[in-house]
Amino acid sequence: MSFDHTALARALRARVRGEVRFDRQARATHSMDASNHRRVPPGVVAPLDAQDVLAALAVCREHGAPVTVRGGGTSIAGQATGNGVVFDLARHLTRVHDVDPLTRIAHVEPGVVLDDLRRAAGRHGLTFGPDPSTHSRCTIGGMIGNDACGSHSVAWGRTSANIEWLDIATADGTRMRVGRGQPVPTTGRAGEIHAALAELADDNLALLRQRFPALPRRVSGYALDRLLPEHGRDVARALVGTEGTCVVVLGAGVRLVEVPKARALAVLGFADDFAAADAAPRLLPYAPLTVESLSAGLVALAGSARDVELPAGQAWLFVEVGGDTVERARAAAVALAGDGPALVVTDPAEQRALWRIREEASGTATRLADGSEAWPGWEDTAVPPAQLGSYLRELAELMTRHGLRGLPYGHFGEGCVHIRIDFDLLTRSGVAAYRAFASDLADLVIAHDGSLSGEHGDGQARAEFLPRMYGAEVVELFGRFKAIWDPQDLLNPGILVRPHPVDGNLRFTGMRAPVSVAFGYPADGGDFAAAVRRCVGVGKCRESADTTSGGVMCPSFRVTGAEEHSTRGRARLLHEMLIGDVITDGWRSSEVRDALDLCLSCKGCRSDCPVDVDMATYKAEFLHHHYRGRLRPAAHYALGNLPLWARAVAAVPGLAGAVNAAAGV
């Protein structure tokens, strides 16, 4: 799509009350999410409220500009990147309007961070069931877009199972509320949409009943089976998981669940991941709240595991159970633990320490024990739990044939496997090998009656293979479904329907390496680009003071809330500097300098970031090159010469005390 960027920016600034930025810094910080993919937007809009979203949509429609809606930017399949205008709904649409403890429904805006909702619901003894490991920074809108799950979905279901209604807007500006208990419109554009959806379902009843398996983690594709009469023609749940391709979510009514009065965590040890996978289905009759896996390889890499003792084994299942009392919860945990190696924990602080290891796995898995880089792309395949053991064994064989390595973990109770693999995404031959492996793995998943995605959505990473999973007829229906909502294809084009290829838009394409540097970067082979690539976008640096998991990263983001003042945003700017097509002036870039200016060099990221990003060192490296051969600001000399000032003062006995006394210190 072609459109006049200057005219578009001018029109948006005239009609949108929120921030409108088409500068290089904003474009660079929103060019990637947590996936392998990169697409540079023309600009970024941060609407103030729902009316602002509608105004921005109208402008984009008038100019023929596509739109990519973004929450926390933690998507792992590339669906939060786009060549259209990015709508950053996490900036201002952050209100929890109401929590009704009687109906157990909360009314939220799409930019609400999950932990903020859980804190509001917790005042009534309630919580939102789905809980991805990014719960401290992912947004409800993003969870709706991806049909997010998390550790507790084995008990409380995916996001789609916890949505009562959605307040939505189409690209043409039609606003409506859809979902359970909502009236079905019969007139106007909203009436046309509902009639077309009913026709699509009624004309394809057999297809929708036969081609959509009852799999706990079937997240791939569109959930068209929700339109069937036996499912109540649930339009809201059909829209969950559409990855921003059909509508813009302006608000949601989410169903809450009661928090167990007490919890016990059983950590069960196994000889390997295969044995853990074989055991997982046998635990389901105990009605656990979680059945999560972790391998010894990941534990060895996790800094948070240093002071935590686990039972004997090379793989573990974290099985949480609830009860009316601590004693009953403990008894249930002991019963399911059996006679094998096990640890049962009821102390909340000890439980949090164990869960932190599991939650940081998406970051720690990005570096193998020898320092090799590992990447997502096939991060969350899912199969029926009863087939998980055989699937994992065949996956290991497939990786060996392709010469690849990775550390599996995930939601074993629902057959969902997370794994980051040491793909070579930097060379043409490596990318070709990545594509070949992706094709073979898609076939393996389908052979096990599985879903290409079990949690994170298809995005750019897997959608190309949807015809293999569903067949051409169903994929054609996906196109019809999107066209009903978005006939101009303005919302997130290239995702799910007519998707970009799996090896397209890779974020390392064009990245310059190596570059001459002053620091050693021993953990990255002396390569500054490899150090910058450590940031995979999991966004732990976007935690607020209210949602923090206990660290201090990133203090400047906590004050400003701006992406460029997060560790991730700064890493993105350095990444774009090394590519050179958005940030074009290299080490002399004012955009990078300005973003680094508020970095305190506190080293919080060095200790808190699960992938050991060291922004203080990167800042020193950048400033060294930026000011080389030029005068620095006076503050640099004043602070940089503090050791000299200290020695000079110390050489005159009593001088420091006299100066302090005169200053009233």
Image: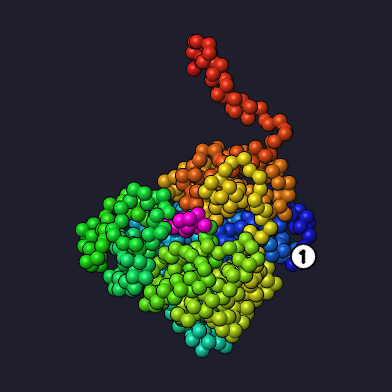
- Who's the residue at 71% across and 52% down the image? 580
**Can the viewer see residue 106 in this picture?**
no
Q: Position of residue 560 (x, y in %)?
A: 57, 43
**Residue located 67% across and 49% down the image:** 577
Q: Is residue 365 magenta?
A: yes
Element at label 1:
loop
Question: Residue 250: which quarter of the image?
Answer: bottom right
Give the camera-side residue of 136 and 10: 136
What range of the chain is rendered magenta?
A: 357-372
Left or right, 80 with reference to 602: right
Closest to the observer, 413 or 513: 513
Is 73 in the magenta? no
Residue 440 appears in the picture as rendered: yes
Residue labelled with disc 1: 2
Residue 443 percent coordinates (x, y): 52, 79
Location of the N terminus (image quadrant): bottom right
Locate residue 206, reporting x and y percent: 51, 89
